[in-house]
Image: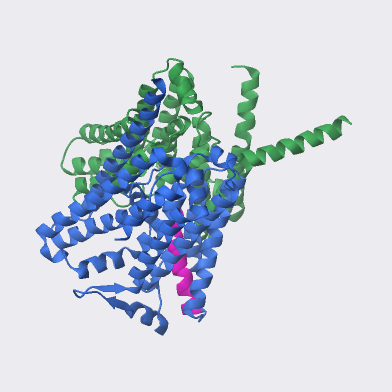
Chain colours: A blue, B green
């Protein structure tokens, strides 16, 4: 499983943060253990869930969430937040439908345009956050209104996307042993996650993001380009939101301005469940992947059960959030106490 | 009050009132009958009354949110708490319980939600944005649990009166918001409570060192926010004569936070003004109503909202303040020469 990679990467990329290392890996281990346990419980109750078919569908159905959550992980690691992603997904979907359906642009060109717009939007928000010293919460809130509003201006209806190239992309899949179909969008999600892991733990940019989230002032003093990194982080989040919009458009074959409402919350929840500290500076892209799968698993379980109502999803996710946040709090508290006890003696 | 603080308060209020006046003026230009207020069946009607009436729930949320933001926190759960309290009130009334029981239970649910948030923030020391995120996600699930997934409707006249009745010509939601605002302002400005809240927002550790019981004040602030949210939830449910667990109060937490920020409070805590936050809530509602009645396509509503938010925020940002100070200094020097 890809989730083992960062354990080794962490040590090399962040030697300056050895103290947080233990407190940092424990949430990931806990997330993995709880996911494995939850899956085991599901399989005991419904043996059919232990199939590549269910696993592949888990990836396909949550592909857009998984992609956007990778960008959100970087934003949160840097100590910020991005509330605009759900609206950007909807805007991208509508933009693609308009470009392909009304303007007759080839899907590939439309994809490139949509990604460019989404990335530029993210970069503008990052620039405002850095240069105007405004809280990310409010800036991305304005971005959320703007993207949703622009989607509404383009259309108020659900626009279908009908194009031969779309149909080809939707039918692409890789047959797994056991009959599961790893679709193109599921493949994109896995690829984005792997790229995110490498970016976070093996590059200078990744180290800068961790340093920024750990302590902005000391990061600046160490020579981290604070402005460029902040802008790049929000541009990256815009890019993943745009890519998630493309994947969502392939998944639903339509552009609808009210689509993906509240996805930003699901993404933030996935990041937190994945063991990333919301204060920034510590966490894993791989954990976010497990956080996304955990949310998908709860939904799959409810579908398999058939008698549970959908609102239990929210309550269970809320309970999980609570559990993980309290666990993080306890770990931070313990790791903060240890050195102070050491210096006292 | 010292004369200096009074002038400074006035200087702070001026830009907000000018923005509000500008929006009202623009609406009047687009719709000439905007300022007309008529009396029908002993009740005031008109676009201005509509702005007050529709703005009341966000104004009530903004009262609680102001106190939370002043401590350096934020309460994301208010929209979900509105759904919970509306669901509780509607379900109890539909079961034939008297109004007093339904109201007490609904407001009690809000207080409990606030207490939960407060304990997470003050005792477990969890970041407010994360602590209240839990209830934001879970709250709607709980509300659906209460209503069993259905939209509960009711015909009880006494509860409906809270949403659409009128006292002395004024719609009931406006009266409730005004009374609550007056009570809140008296409570925080005539006692030391307001100063305690600002102290925590400016420097929590220093407040602890100064002997302030920070935990109790913080919990009280989140309980107040939960109470305000519950009240707003009951008003909204009474207005539509039903409880919709999925849509009641949806995204209103963002409007409430926006109202407080438009009112000039810093999200980092400290300085706050409940009255200015209510003006902020009215700015948001005047904008919504103005766009609707001017015949402008409602699709542009969100874009305009985003644009106005950005303009006001840029004007308020520390960087803009520095530039303004630099310009003022330069013109001051030229004048002296």
Residue B333 visible (yes or no): yes
Which sits in the foreground, A126 or A227?
Answer: A227
Secondary structure mostly seen in magenta is: helix
Q: Is residue B243 magenta?
A: no
Which sits in the foreground, A283 or B111?
Answer: A283
Q: Residue at x 71, y 40 (%)?
A: B323
Q: Which quadrant of the figure contains the N terminus of chain B? A: top right
Range drawn in magenta = A80-102
Number of marks drawn: 0
Q: Quadrant of residue B168?
A: top left
- Above or below residue A286? Residue B17 is above
Q: Position of residue A273 (x, y in %)?
A: 31, 48
- Above or below residue A89? Residue A28 is above
Q: Position of residue A25 (x, y in %)?
A: 33, 45
Q: Position of residue A44 (x, y in %)?
A: 10, 58
Q: Position of residue A122 (x, y in %)?
A: 53, 57
- Above or below residue B324? Residue A205 is below
Q: Residue at x 51, y 46 (%)?
A: A136
Q: Quadrant of residue B103?
A: top left
Which sits in the foreground, B188 or A281?
Answer: A281
């Amino acid at each position: 499983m890809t989730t083992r990679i960062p354990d080794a990467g962490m040590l090399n990329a962040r030697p300056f943060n050895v103290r947080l290392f233990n407190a940092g890996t424990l949430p990931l281990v806990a997330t993995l253990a709880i996911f494995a346990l939850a899956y085991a419980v599901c399989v005991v109750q419904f043996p059919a869930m232990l199939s590549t078919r269910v696993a592949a569908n888990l990836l396909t159905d949550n592909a857009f969430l998984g992609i956007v959550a990778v960008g959100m992980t970087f934003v949160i690691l840097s100590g910020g937040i991005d509330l605009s992603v759900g609206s950007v997904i909807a805007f991208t979907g509508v933009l693609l439908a308009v470009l392909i359906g009304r303007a007759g642009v080839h899907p590939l060109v439309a994809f490139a345009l949509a990604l460019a717009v989404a990335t530029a939007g993210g970069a503008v928000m990052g620039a405002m956050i850095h240069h105007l010293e405004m809280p990310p919460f409010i800036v991305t809130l304005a971005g959320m209104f703007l993207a949703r509003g622009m989607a509404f201006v383009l259309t108020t209806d659900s626009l279908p996307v009908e194009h031969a190239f779309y149909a080809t992309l939707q039918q692409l899949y890789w047959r797994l042993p056991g009959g599961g179909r790893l679709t193109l969008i599921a493949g994109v999600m896995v690829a984005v996650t792997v790229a995110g892991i490498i970016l976070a733990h093996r590059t200078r940019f990744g180290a800068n993001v961790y340093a920024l989230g750990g302590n902005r002032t000391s990061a600046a003093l160490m020579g981290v380009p604070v402005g460029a990194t902040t802008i790049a982080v929000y541009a990256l989040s815009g890019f993943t939101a745009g890519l998630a919009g493309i994947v969502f458009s392939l998944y639903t074959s339509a552009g609808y301005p009210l689509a993906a409402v509240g996805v930003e919350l699901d993404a933030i929840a996935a990041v937190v469940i994945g063991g990333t500290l919301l204060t920034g500076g510590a966490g894993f892209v791989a954990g976010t992947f497990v956080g996304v799968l955990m949310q998908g698993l709860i939904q799959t379980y409810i579908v398999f059960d058939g008698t549970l109502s959908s609102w239990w999803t929210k309550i269970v996710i809320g309970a999980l959030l609570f559990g993980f946040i309290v666990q993080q709090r306890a770990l931070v508290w313990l790791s903060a106490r240890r050195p102070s006890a050491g210096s006292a003696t | 009050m010292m004369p200096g603080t009074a002038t400074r308060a006035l200087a702070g209020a001026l830009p907000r009132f000018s923005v509000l006046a500008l929006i009202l003026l623009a609406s009047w230009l687009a719709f000439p009958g905007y300022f007309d207020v008529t009396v029908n069946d002993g009740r005031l009607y008109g676009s201005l009354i509509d702005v007050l009436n529709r703005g009341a729930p966000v104004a009530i949320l903004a009262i609680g949110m102001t106190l939370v933001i002043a401590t350096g926190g934020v309460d994301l759960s208010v929209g979900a708490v509105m759904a919970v309290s509306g669901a509780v009130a509607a379900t109890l009334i539909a079961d034939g319980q008297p109004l007093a029981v339904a109201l007490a239970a609904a407001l009690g649910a809000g207080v409990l939600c606030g207490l939960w948030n407060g304990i997470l923030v003050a005792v477990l020391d969890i970041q407010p944005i994360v602590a209240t995120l839990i209830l934001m996600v879970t709250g709607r699930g709980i509300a659906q649990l209460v209503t069993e997934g259905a939209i509960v409707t009711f015909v009880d006249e006494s509860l409906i009166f809270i949403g659409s009745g009128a006292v002395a010509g004024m719609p009931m939601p406006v009266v409730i918001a005004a009374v609550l605002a007056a009570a809140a302002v008296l409570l925080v400005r005539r006692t030391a409570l307001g100063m305690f809240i600002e102290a925590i927002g400016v420097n929590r550790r220093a407040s602890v060192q100064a002997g302030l019981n920070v935990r109790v004040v913080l919990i009280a602030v989140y309980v107040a926010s939960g109470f305000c949210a519950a009240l707003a939830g009951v008003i909204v449910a009474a207005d539509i004569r039903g409880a919709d667990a999925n849509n009641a109060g949806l995204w209103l937490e963002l409007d409430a936070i926006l109202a407080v920020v438009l009112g000039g409070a810093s999200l980092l805590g400290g300085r706050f003004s409940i009255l200015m936050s209510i003006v902020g809530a009215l700015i948001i509602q005047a904008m919504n109503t103005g766009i609707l009645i001017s015949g402008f396509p409602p699709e542009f509503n969100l874009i305009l909202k985003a644009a106005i938010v950005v303009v006001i925020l840029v004007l308020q940002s520390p960087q803009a303040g520095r530039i303004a100070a630099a310009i003022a200094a330069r013109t001051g020097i030229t004048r002296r020469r």
